[in-house]
């Protein structure tokens, strides 16, 4: 292993829905990633808009847009077999997806159990996809794993071994985290959180690589904050004001309207610390500043927008390396180091 380590981890900096799918897809193309590994579970929907087509992915890594990237599902991830197989087909990624034999399987009874829990539905505001109940079964050591499923037989591999080997060979490995830092079971706004830790260290653990093999930790923020379901949201705007600003969105998995608040610098700074971020990406800058829509050249960022980004960068104390200026993966301004 040389001085420069190739693994990059992408995590959400707020409450999920920051646009990690787009950031991961962009990086997969830009960095010629050899292996991308999706963590988390199917409650997280990652949207990718690439060359006029839209995918809403709940299992397959968003890096699929690069046809030479191998796609992995982490040991710590949870999949639903039918959903995974359908996404492999929809993304045309058959032949390059491998599922760690230790990945967990969500079954219908997990979904039914969540649906019958008033606590999850009403208090926590769960997406009710069976994820938390599957985690419970994993802890009880009764969960079915990928290695137990006939339909997955041809897809099984050891992702940890593959990721470590590639990293040692100097090949780019990208880890796709899910949800957001403040939905973390440990560091989030408990009990209004998801059923796993969602910080960078947890995703490394899900894949099975150690912290010393990471070069970059990129925390993704949106230019405003959204939250699906209950729990604290500082600076929350009334819905009519949010609609006027064009900030109202609908959940990828649930279709529920998202609550909104302006960009929260203090929360973002905490996310940088919790994840040991080396850099930040800010998505949907065009929603905050319509004049930046579709800009891809750093020289074309209007000075007012540049000042806002500089201010955020100063407060976060890490470089802002990417700006999202539209839905398309390629509607991105890359400000990081050029290879
Ligand atoms: P659960 O993880 O589905 O049980 O949901 C627990 C909480 O996390 C709820 O407030 C959900 O809305 C939120 N949540 C879970 N996954 C996501 C996600 O991918 N994006 C945004 N919110 C999520």
Image: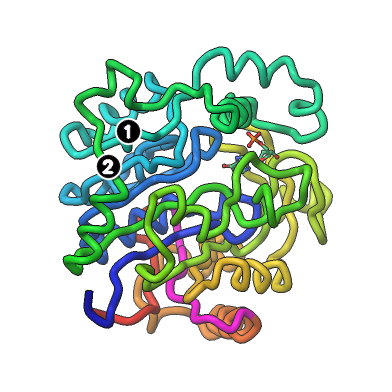
In the rendered structure, which segment of residues is drawn in magenta? 316-327
The color scheme shown is rainbow
Q: Nearer the viewer, residue 156 or 302?
A: 156
Q: How crowded is mark 2: few (under 14 residues within 10 Å), some or many (20 or more)?
A: some
Name the residue rendered at 38%, 39% in the picture: 54
Q: Is residue 301 above or below residue 234?
A: below
Q: Within the magenta stretch, is there residue 294?
A: no
Instruction: Report the Cα–Cα distance between label 1 and label 2.
Output: 6 Å
Residue 1, x across and y down, in percent: 22, 74
Marks 1 and 2 in Cβ contact (< 8 Å): yes
The residue sitting at 51% across, 58% down in the picture is: 11
Q: Is residue 254 visible?
A: no
x%, y% of residue 306? 53, 82
In the image, residue 323 lies in the stretch drawn in magenta: yes
Q: What element carries label 1?
A: loop
The image shows a total of numbered marks equal to 2
State the image coordinates of residue 52 (x, y, percent, origin top left).
31, 44
* Circle nearer the N terminus (1, 2): 1
Label 2 CB-ligand 1 distance < 8 A: no
Q: Dot 1, how many residues are within 10 Å of its Cα: few (below 14), some (14-19), or many (20+)?
A: many
Q: Residue at x 44, y 56 (%)?
A: 204
Task: Determine which of the numbered discs, if any, sits on residue 171 in the image.
Answer: none
Q: Report the residue marked by disc 2.
A: 158
Q: Position of residue 51 (x, y in %)?
A: 28, 48
Res. 330 in view: yes
**On the picture, is 10 further left or further right than 165?**
right
Quadrant position of residue 307: bottom right
Q: Quadrant of residue 101 in the image?
A: top left
User: On residue 101, which mark appears?
Assistant: 1
């Amino acid at each position: 292993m040389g001085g420069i380590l190739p693994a990059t981890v992408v995590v959400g900096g707020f409450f999920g829905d920051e646009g990690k799918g787009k950031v991961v897809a962009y990086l997969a193309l830009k960095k010629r990633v050899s292996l991308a590994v999706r963590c988390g579970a199917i409650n997280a929907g990652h949207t990718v808009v690439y060359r006029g087509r839209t995918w809403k992915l709940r299992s397959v890594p968003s890096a699929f847009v690069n046809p030479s990237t191998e796609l992995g599902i982490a040991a710590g991830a949870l999949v639903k077999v039918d959903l995974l197989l359908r996404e492999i087909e929809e993304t045309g990624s058959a032949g390059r997806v491998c599922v760690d034999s230790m990945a967990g399987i969500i079954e219908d009874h997990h979904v039914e159990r969540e649906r019958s829990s008033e606590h999850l539905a009403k208090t926590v505001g769960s997406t009710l996809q069976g994820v938390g109940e599957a985690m419970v079964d994993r802890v009880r050591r009764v969960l079915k794993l990928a290695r137990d499923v006939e339909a997955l037989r041809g897809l099984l591999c050891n992702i940890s071994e593959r990721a470590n080997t590639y990293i040692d060979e100097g090949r780019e490995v990208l880890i796709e985290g899910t949800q957001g830092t403040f939905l973390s079971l440990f560091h989030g706004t408990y009990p209004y959180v998801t059923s796993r830790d969602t910080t960078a260290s947890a995703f490394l653990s899900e894949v099975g690589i150690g912290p010393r093999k990471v070069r970059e930790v990129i925390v993704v923020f949106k230019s405003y904050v959204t939250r699906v379901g209950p729990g604290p949201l500082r600076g929350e705007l009334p819905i009519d004001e949010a609609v006027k600003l064009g900030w109202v969105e609908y959940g990828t998995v649930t279709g529920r309207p998202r609550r909104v608040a302006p960009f929260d610098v203090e929360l973002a700074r905490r996310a940088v610390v919790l994840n040991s971020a080396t850099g930040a990406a800010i998505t949907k800058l065009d929603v905050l500043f319509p004049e930046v829509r579709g800009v891809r050249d750093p020289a074309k960022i209007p000075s007012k927008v540049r000042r806002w980004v500089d201010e955020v960068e100063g407060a976060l104390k890490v470089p802002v390396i990417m700006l999202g200026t539209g839905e398309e993966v390629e509607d991105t301004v890359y400000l990081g180091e050029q290879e």
